């Protein structure tokens, strides 16, 4: 029995706490996953997992192996992929994380366009507005909006995102158009709680930052939902261009305060520090740099 399969089964079981969940993750049967782990324990002559009727836990030896095995498996997979890719093109799985709205509007299409050029690749796209742990979740590449401060990550800048205040023609007809940022304080504003300071909207004019505190009946944790509410005429949204560009083009939303723009926020591709970047990940990042510039979403 292959030690690599045994290690993969052990890591998946240890991380999920369940043979069933590990089997689902690996795409094999529950029985085979349990068999792989048992074979690994016999091979090593130690018990790695504590099995109960409800959960699988780690022994001290298992904890030590779990701290080292994922890196070992990643490096082996990268080595084999690079050797294979040099002769047969890019192959294997790429696990990607992205914010929900940005992932739905852009990243899904990005990987479809990239996949068309590389038929040997598979993709696992996970959308989450939280900053996932790349190491524990097995993520190869994450798209991040905003500053990444974690020392364990390296970042490649893809571009800068700007946000705009927008409203529907119906809202403007009923409530008028704010002519200054400060006038937003007297309007119904839709608050996106995914922002670092949801009720503080920042603008730039002639290089100067202008901050406005806003209020409103509606708060959501999605730029797309904020834009949808604005299209219904219930208030003014402050949303990134990628979330409102289509609605503006169709006339469903109207940009407000055109002489102002939002403070630019960096969009990056991030990956783990301290390991050689596989060729397929480098290729995807390079493709994203060009593709995002052509998408005209920022």
Image: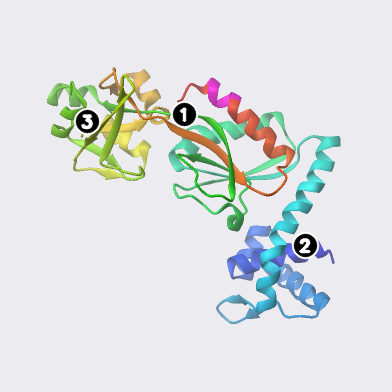
CA separation in Å, label 1 and label 2: 42 Å
Left or right: residue 78 compared with residue 208:
right
Question: The residue tagged with tag 1: helix, strand or loop?
Answer: strand
Q: Position of residue 239 (x, y in %)?
A: 34, 32
Of marks 1 and 2, the one in the foreground: 1
Query: Residue tagged by mark 3?
Result: 233
Of marks 2 and 3, the one in the foreground: 2
Question: The residue tagged with tag 2: helix, strand or loop?
Answer: helix
Q: Is residue 113 visible?
A: no
CA separation in Å, label 2 and label 3: 56 Å
Q: Which residues are magenta?
A: 290-294
Query: Residue tagged by mark 1?
Result: 160
Left or right: residue 203 compared with residue 73:
left
Residue at position x 68%, y 39% in the image: 281
Nearest to N terminus: mark 1 or mark 2: 2
Nearest to N terminus: mark 2 or mark 3: 2
Q: Position of residue 68 (x, y in %)?
A: 70, 64
Question: How is the rendered protein coloured?
Answer: rainbow
Nearest to N terminus: mark 1 or mark 3: 1
Left or right: residue 298 compared with residue 114:
left
The N terminus lies in which quarter of the figure? bottom right
């Amino acid at each position: 029995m292959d030690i690599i399969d045994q290690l993969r089964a052990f890591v998946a079981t240890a991380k999920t706490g369940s043979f069933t969940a590990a089997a689902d993750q690996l795409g094999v049967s529950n029985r085979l996953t349990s068999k792989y782990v048992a074979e690994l324990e016999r091979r090593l002559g130690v018990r790695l997992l504590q099995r109960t009727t409800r959960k699988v836990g780690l022994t001290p030896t298992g904890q030590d192996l779990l701290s080292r095995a994922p890196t070992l498996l990643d490096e082996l997979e990268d080595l084999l992929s690079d050797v294979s890719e040099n002769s047969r093109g890019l192959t294997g799985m790429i696990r990607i994380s992205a914010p929900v709205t940005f992932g739905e509007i852009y990243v899904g299409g990005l990987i479809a366009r990239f996949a068309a050029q590389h038929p040997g690749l598979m993709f696992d796209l996970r959308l989450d507005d939280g900053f996932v742990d790349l190491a524990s979740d097995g993520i190869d590449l994450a798209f991040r909006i905003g500053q990444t401060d974690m020392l364990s990550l390296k970042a490649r800048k893809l571009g800068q995102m700007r946000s705009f205040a927008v409203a529907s023609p119906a809202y403007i007809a009923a409530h008028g158009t704010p002519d200054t940022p400060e006038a937003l304080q007297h309007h119904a504003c839709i608050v996106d709680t995914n922002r670092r300071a949801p009720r503080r909207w920042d603008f730039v004019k002639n290089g100067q930052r202008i901050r406005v505190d806003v209020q409103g009946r509606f708060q959501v944790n999605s730029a797309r939902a904020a834009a949808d509410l604005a299209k219904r005429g219930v208030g003014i949204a402050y949303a990134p261009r990628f979330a409102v560009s289509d609605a503006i083009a169709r006339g469903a939303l109207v940009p407000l305060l055109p002489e102002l723009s939002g403070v630019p926020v960096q969009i990056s591709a991030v990956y783990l520090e301290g390991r050689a970047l596989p060729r397929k990940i480098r290729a995807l990042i390079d493709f994203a740099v060009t593709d995002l510039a052509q998408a005209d979403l920022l």
